[in-house]
């Protein structure tokens, strides 16, 4: 497979290998946490990130034209820098078309590859091929409007030292009047990915355009919970950036939507099955992420207690 994009929807299978830590986080800005590990556990250096396509009006970032230009290239370079600084190995991304994908990959080491699909608000997975071997890729569609579908990708990756899991990057419908489409998309995702996982443990992660507490926006959350998945936000003792929104309405000016001693609205989510553990939950919300996208990246520390084959899914905006 050549470095760059691969046609199809987004998902991923990764394997349980030697002991590893999740992406390290440092500093005192909102959303930055401490490195954690679990003895004998297999860690997954994973994140989900909606990088905001250049094909929309990005006046929030001082870039009102709906085309890829130097401002968007600078944003994608910041995405790549974030991936390198956090030492991430698997990243589920949304709103990443060809230009955005190329802009990110240009600034990553050559052992990183990207898989995704053409179409509106692409989903994709970027992975470190030195740590993970590509096995298989497939796609499925979810409806985001009455006559419009959005392709989703699943991919199987195998850890260079052992087993498998599965990850998908999803991007469900936006808008208050499209709750039924988010519910249908979540249900289709669960059915499809269960078939792909074939009984293996898995994670669902990404931007679903809903949340866990707002009436008319909780449908997809309830579908994933009803499927037996656990929402990672409330599992770990260590949570960072929990008081900030994952979708940042103040993006572009180095500011965030945060509430002191409060709870932010997270439309970017990660769910896990019982075989996977969560060490920490890290919504990285700072001045730099504000100037990169209208979404903040989310890094849950995921690990498997014992040597087993598992599965991971991500979801998207």
Image (cartoon, rainbow, N blue to C red):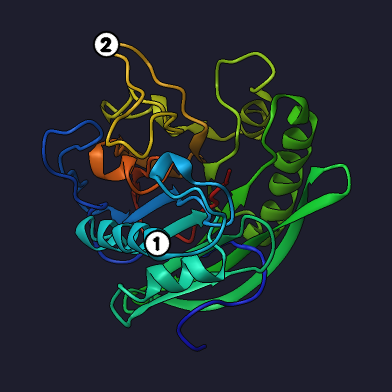
Residues packed near mark 2 inside 10 Å, few (<14), some (14 to 19) or many (20 plus): few
Task: Identify the residue at horizontal 36%, vertical 24% (top origin).
Answer: 257
- Figure quadrant of residue 123: bottom right
Relative to residue 265, is residue 195 depicted above or below?
Answer: below
Task: Identify the residue at horizontal 66%, vertical 28% (top origin).
Answer: 226
**Residues under labels 2 and 1: Cα distance?**
31 Å
Residues packed near mark 1 inside 10 Å, few (<14), some (14 to 19) or many (20 plus): many
- Which label was assigned to residue 261? 2
In the displayed structure, does residue 192 sit left or right of residue 160? Answer: right
Q: Position of residue 48 (x, y in %)?
A: 44, 49
The extreme left residue here reads 27
Figure quadrant of the C terminus = top right
- Figure quadrant of residue 15: bottom left
Q: Camera-side residue: 65 or 213?
A: 65
Q: Position of residue 75 (x, y in %)?
A: 36, 57
Q: Camera-side residue: 126 or 199?
A: 126
In the displayed structure, does residue 91 sit left or right of residue 139? Answer: left
The extreme top residue here reads 261
Q: Camera-side residue: 76 or 32?
A: 76
- Res. 164 in view: no
Q: Camera-side residue: 181 or 295?
A: 295
The extreme right residue here reads 147
The residue labelled by disc 1 is 90
Q: Position of residue 44 (x, y in %)?
A: 34, 56
Number of numbered discs overlaid on the protein picture = 2
- Res. 212 in view: yes
Task: Identify the residue at horizontal 56%, vertical 25% (top origin).
Answer: 211
* Local secondary structure at mark 1: strand
Q: Position of residue 22 (x, y in %)?
A: 26, 52
């Amino acid at each position: 497979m050549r470095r760059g994009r691969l046609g199809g929807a987004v998902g991923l299978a990764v394997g349980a290998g030697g002991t590893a830590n999740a992406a390290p986080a440092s500093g005192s800005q909102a959303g930055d946490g401490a490195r954690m590990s679990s003895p004998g556990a297999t860690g997954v250096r994973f994140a989900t990130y909606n990088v905001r396509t250049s094909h929309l009006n990005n006046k929030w970032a001082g870039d009102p034209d709906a085309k890829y230009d130097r401002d968007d290239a600078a944003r994608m370079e910041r995405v790549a820098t974030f991936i390198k600084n956090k030492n991430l190995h698997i990243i589920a991304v949304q709103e990443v078309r060809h230009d955005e994908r190329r802009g990110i990959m240009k600034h990553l080491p050559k052992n990183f590859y990207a898989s995704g699909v053409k179409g509106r608000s692409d989903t994709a997975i970027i992975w470190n091929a030195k740590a993970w071997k590509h096995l298989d890729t497939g796609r499925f569609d979810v409806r985001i409007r009455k006559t419009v579908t959005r392709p989703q990708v699943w991919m199987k990756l195998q850890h260079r030292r052992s087993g498998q899991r599965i990850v998908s990057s999803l991007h469900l419908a936006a808008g208050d009047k499209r709750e039924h489409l988010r519910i249908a998309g979540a249900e289709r995702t669960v059915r499809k990915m269960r078939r792909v996982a074939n009984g293996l443990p898995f994670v669902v992660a990404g931007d679903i355009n809903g949340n866990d507490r707002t009436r008319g926006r909780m449908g997809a959350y309830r579908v994933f919970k009803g499927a037996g998945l656990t929402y990672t936000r409330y599992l770990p003792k260590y949570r960072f950036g929990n008081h900030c929104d994952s979708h940042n309405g103040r993006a572009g000016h180095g500011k965030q939507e945060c509430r002191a001693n409060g709870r932010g609205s997270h439309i970017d989510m990660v769910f896990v099955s019982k075989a996977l553990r969560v060490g920490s939950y890290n919504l990285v919300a700072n001045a730099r992420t504000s100037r990169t996208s209208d979404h903040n990246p989310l890094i849950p520390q995921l690990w498997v207690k014992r040597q087993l084959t598992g599965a991971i899914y991500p979801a998207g905006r």
